[in-house]
Amino acid sequence: MFRNFGSAFVNRFALPRLAGRWVGAAIVAALVSSFAALGCSSSSDNNTDAGPSQPTNCDINQLGTLFAKKLCSSAACHDPAGTSAHLNLTADSGLAGRLVGQSPAGGGGLPSMCANLTPPKIYLVAGSQPATGLLLDKISPSYSGCGIRMPYNLPVLTTDEIACVQSWATSVTKP
């Protein structure tokens, strides 16, 4: 008797509910895979896994826009007064001169933790192709050297943003 009751219960109530869940899950899975097949994706400021979407050639104006957007050259950071680490990242005609072959000077309202090291750190190494140096190291999502990763207390730069800084830096470190 219980055997018949159990079978009847399963056939009447449990299977349709389970089948309904399976059908619902299948519909959701089909929709998700359809969106993925259409190329629907989300973008994120933290997307550092993918390579640059296209070759990047950044000039001083694009670099200035990026630094302003990320607050690098704003008041209380690397502004014209050199408030943080006595470094001015204002994107003007003098920016390359302030970085290429230059070591952190220290000072400012928030002194650099990378100043006075042996061997000295260089913001951008003259003649390096592609450009290398402390500026590029500190914007790397995996930075673990002196001081802290930049921008401080903000999301890491995207792969495209890092490629922009790298492109500009390479253009100014040519021998």
Image: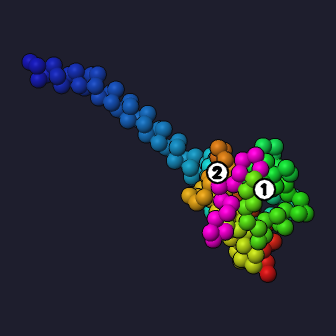
Find numbered disc 2 in the image and state the secondary structure of the residue it sits on: loop
Does the image show residue 163?
Answer: no
Find numbered disc 1 in the image and state the secondary structure of the residue it sits on: loop
Q: Residue 117 at what x, y percent from top left?
A: 64, 65
153 vs 1, nearest the viewer: 153
For label 1, the crowd category at 10 Å Cα-Cα, with few meaning under 14, some 14 to 19 and many 20 or more, is many
Q: Residue 65 at what x, y percent from top left?
A: 83, 52
Find residue 139 and name its label. none
Relative horizontal placement of residue 30, taking residue 156 as reference (left or right): left
Span colored in magenta? 108-120
The residue at the point 28 percent across, 25 percent down is: 14
Secondary structure mostly seen in the magenta stretch: loop
Residue 50 sits above or below residue 174 on the image: above
Relative horizontal placement of residue 170, taking residue 33 as reference (left or right): right
User: Image quadrant for the C terminus?
Assistant: bottom right
66 vs 90, nearest the viewer: 90
The residue at the point 73 percent across, 56 percent down is: 106
Q: Residue 160 at what x, y percent from top left?
A: 70, 59
* Mark toward the viewer: 2 or 1: 1
| Structural distance between the alpha carbons of marks 2 and 1 | 20 Å
Q: Name which of mark 2 and mark 1 comes first in the sequence.
A: 1
The residue at the point 17 percent across, 22 percent down is: 6
User: Which quadrant of the figure has residue 141?
Assistant: bottom right
Check the image and name the residue furthest to the bottom. 175
The residue at the point 67 percent across, 47 percent down is: 152
- For mark 2, what is the residue? 156
Residue 55 sits above or below residue 41 on the image: below
- For mark 1, what is the residue? 87
Given the image, on which type of amino acid does mark 1 rest?
Leu
Given the image, on which type of amino acid does mark 2 rest?
Val
